Amino acid sequence: MFDPENGRLAIGRGRVAVMFAHYNYFGTSGNHTGDTFISVDLETCAVPLQTDIKLGWSWGASHSLYQQLYYDGSKFVSAALGDANPQNILFSVVYLNGSTNILTNEKLLNGDIPGLGNGKSSGRLGGLVKLTPDLFLTTYSRFKSTGTNTQNDKPELGIVSFNNTLNRIKTRALTNDNNVNTIKTAKFGNRLIIGYALTNQTHSANGYLPQVSSPDTDTMYVMVVTPSTAIVSGPIEVANFSISPSDDWETLSDGRVVWTYVGEDNVLRLWSITGEPDPNSNEFYGDPPSEVNEPVPAPDPPSSTTNLTVYPIFTLICSLFVILLN
């Protein structure tokens, strides 16, 4: 195992769970990438060579382009977008009951999300949210495209709901856009808020888009859906609104949905959406996305209330642990 790439972490049952993509060397077959899931004890995770490590799997989706990881109070639920094995989203449930028990399903979505097996996928993975004790929802998009022995003729921004045992409840296309390049999802009251970017970048000959998102090429939209996936607000275009492909939206205890964004000035900014759902209105409720005018927790005192210098990744991870534990 070498060259770790992107990943996600979650904390539950006194353990830190980590799901991340990395490279392995397979001899004459060369180097390939996939994802691994491990968990370590929360109290001793900083101790070198600590032995309380539980392995969920050593090779999951490949390549594992995007990951989501969620702890719901009893188990970890994950999703990973693959570009070869599978050319789809691989969902998993991990129970840590002394030993590690795992459920997997790569067929929650009908059809394929074509990929080329070289780091390119015609799909995107949004957030993973739990709305009720037995209801999870995940957003995704896929372009009209061809892959390795696969094809998709129906572009869409969609949503799939499923239960605790990875049985599909419902799949629905929310739009038929062919250029949804970034998606974020979070719990918003008792509903789901979805932010996404429509890009004006050009598709390749077989239907793929660059996996980057920029205010220069993207237009941002927001919509709100019910647990049954009905759209109750939007899509609404939002100006001066930026989301990063690599970061998630999080719902705070006060109901705000917050996320970070690093602009071209290499400054980390915290943004938020506030407001309460209004079942009698089809308009977007709450304040529009805006920078947060309050101090942002940081390893060192920030230079202003909204701007925070970007620190090395290990410093930021340590700071996140401190914030979560407090």
Image: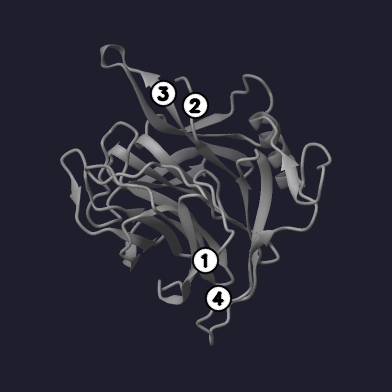
Mark linked to residue 88: none
Residue type at mark 3? Tyr
> Where, by quadrant of the figure, is residue 52 drawn?
top right
Label 2 or label 1, whichever comes before in sequence order: 2
> Looking at the image, which residue is at 34% across and 48% down?
123
In the picture as drawn, the residue positioned furthest to the top comes out as 28
Circle 3 residues within 10 Å: few <14, some 14–19, many ≥20: some
- Screen quadrant of the N terminus: top left
Per the image, the residue denoted by label 2 is 4
In the rendered view, does 219 fall on the left or right side of 116? right
Per the image, the residue denoted by label 3 is 23
CA separation in Å, label 3 and label 2: 7 Å
Q: Is residue 132 visible?
A: no
Q: Is residue 216 above or below residue 22?
A: below
Mark linked to residue 284: 4
Residue type at mark 1? Ile
Query: Dot 4 lies on which element?
Result: loop
Q: Is residue 20 above or below residue 170?
A: above
Label 1 or label 4, whichever comes before in sequence order: 1
Q: Position of residue 115 (x, y in %)?
A: 27, 40
Q: Is residue 301 visible?
A: yes
Indicate which label's residue lies in the foreground, 1 or 3: 1
Marks 1 and 4 in Cβ contact (< 8 Å): no
> Looking at the image, which residue is at 32% across and 67% down?
172
> Where, by quadrant of the figure, is residue 263 drawn?
top right
Residue type at mark 2? Pro
Query: Dot 2 lies on which element?
Result: loop
Per the image, the residue denoted by label 1 is 193
Label 4 or label 3, whichever comes before in sequence order: 3
From the viewer's side, name the closer residue of 154 and 250: 154
Label 3 or label 2, whichever comes before in sequence order: 2
